Amino acid sequence: MTNIRFGTDGWRGIIAADVTFDTVRLVARAIARRVLVEAGQPPPPHILVGYDTRFLSRDFAQAAAEAMAAEGVRVSLADRFAPTPAFSYAVVRLRAAGAVVITASHNPPQYSGVKFKAAFGGSAPVSFTRGVEEEIRRIEAQAIQGAAGSEQRAGIGSFDARTPWLDRLEELVDVPRIGRSGIRVALDVMYGAGQGLLAERLRKAGCSVRELHAEVNPGFGGLQPEPIPTYMGALLEAVTGWDGAGSRVGFAFDGDSDRIGPVDEDGAVISPHQTLALLVRHLVRNRKERGAVVKSVNIGHMVDLEAQASGLPLVVTPIGFKFIAAAMQEHDALVGGEESGGFAMRGHIPERDPGLVSLLLLECMAMTGKSLGALVRDMESEYGPHRYGRVDLRLATLADRDRVVRQVTTAPPVRLCGQPLRQTETLDGVKLIRADWSWLMLRASGTEPLLRIYAEARSAADVTALLEWGKAAALGKG
C-alpha cells in the first residue's frame, strides 16, 4: 500500500521512489473517480492535464491522461508545458471540471508530484483531496491495475494553455503603457514553466527584457527553483549590473511559475509582505478599485496598515492558498496573498498568478513614474520600517514539533524579548503579538518534524532576537 497524502497544494515525492508511473496513474484514477461522483449525471466531466519542465513531466502527464480516460472522463492534454496559473485559467475558460498538473512547484529537481485545480480555478478543497486519498485506498484494495490501452490515447484531446492565459493578462493590465515607460525588466524563470512567455509579451510591448535560465533543464542547473533570496543571486546581479537609462527591476518565478520574488533597482528583494501591501496600494490609489484584502496569518502588519488607510476590510486565514482562495470568493475580495510569495487578484482566478503580479507592479511603476524601491520607501515613510525573517527548525520527532507549539500556546510569555505581549492568536500555530505590533509565530509543518518560526519587527536585529527566542523555546533552552 502506498502512503500518498495531499498537502496544502497537492502531493509530492521523489521521482522513481515515490512518484512513479504506477503512482501517478493511481492518483489520476482516484481523482477521476471523485470528479465523476461529484458530477453526478452525464455528460462525462472534462478534466485537463498539464505539466511543467521537470524530468518525465510530459510522460507522467500522458500516463495520468490515459488513466483518467480509462475511468470514463473526457480528457485534454496540454500541447506544451505552461505555468500552473495558465492551467488554472484554462479550467475556467474551458468550463472544465478541473485540471491535473504534474509539478513539484519549488521543490528540488529530484521531486515531482500532482496538483489538482478545481472547477473554479483554485486548489481543490480539503474535502476533495481527502476523498481522493480514500479512493486511492479503495483502488489499492481492489488491486486494480493502472495501465490504459492505446484506444484511450486516441481519445485524449489537446489544448493550448499558454496563449489564452497571456491574452487574459494583457486584458487585465495596461501592458502598452508599461512598454512606453522605458522600464528594463529582468526575469529569472529558474528553468521552469514560465520561460519565454512574459518575456515575449513584454518585448512585443517595447520593453527591454533580460531572461535568465530560460531553457529546459530538468536538473535546474543545480539551482533550487524557489524565488527566495538564497537562490536569487543571478537575478540580483543582472539587475544591479544593468547599465543604461530607465528604471530597472527584476522578478524571479518558481518551477511551475506560481510564486514570485521581486527585486528592486538596488538589488533588494521585496518581501511578500511588502509586495502585498504595494498591490493593495496600487489597486486602490492608482486603479481606484475597492474590496476586502485577504492575507494568511503569517503575513506582516504593513498590509493591515495599508488596508486600514484605504478603509478596506481585512480577512485573515490559516496558511495555505486554498484558504485564501475560499475567503476571496466568500468576500468578493480585491486581493489575497501569502508569505510564500503567492498572490491573487479579483477578476481573474482565485489562485496564485505571478505573471499578473509582475505586470501589476510594472503598471504601478509606469503610472507613478517611480522605481520599485522608491514605492516601497514611500510606504515605509508612512508606516515605518517592517523587517521580517523565518527559520525552519528540524526537530527529532513529530511529537517534539507539536510539543513546542502546545507549550507556547498553553503558557505564553508575559514579556517577549523585553516587550509586553498585546495578544496571542491560535488561528494556525501560535502567534505572539507584542505591544508595538511586532510578532513571533510558531507553526508545525504539515508532514515533517519541522517547526516553522516567523518574526516581524521594526529592525533586523529585533527580528533576529525574536527568531532566537523561538529556537531557544523549541530546543528547551528558553
Image (spheres, helix red, strand yellow):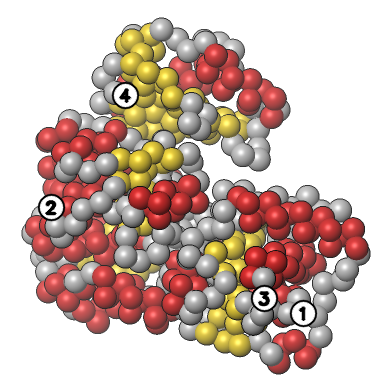
Residue 66 visible, this angle: no
Q: Nearer the viewer, mark 4 or mark 2?
A: 2
Q: In the visual, does 155 lie left or right of 428?
A: right
Q: Nearer the viewer, residue 13 or 309?
A: 309
First in residue order: circle 4 vs circle 2: 2
First in residue order: circle 2 vs circle 3: 3
Which residue lies under the disc numbered 2?
Answer: 285
Going 41% across and 7% down the picture, which residue do you hit? 414
Where residue 101 appears, as percent x and y from the top left, is: 58, 68
**Disc 1 packing (10 Å; few <14; some 14–19; many ≥20):** many
Q: In the visual, does 273 lie left or right of 112?
A: left
How many angstroms separate mark 1 from mark 3 (CA)? 18 Å
User: Residue 70 — which label?
Assistant: 1
Where residue 26 appears, as percent x and y from the top left, is: 77, 65
Which residue lies under the disc numbered 3?
Answer: 41
Going 58% across and 15% down the picture, which residue do you hit? 407
Q: Secondary structure at mark 3?
A: loop
User: Residue 244 — which label?
Assistant: none
Q: Amino acid at mark 1?
A: Ala
How many angstroms separate mark 2 from mark 1 (CA)? 52 Å
First in residue order: circle 4 vs circle 3: 3
Vertically, is 70 above or below 255?
below
How many angstroms separate mark 4 from mark 3 (CA)? 53 Å
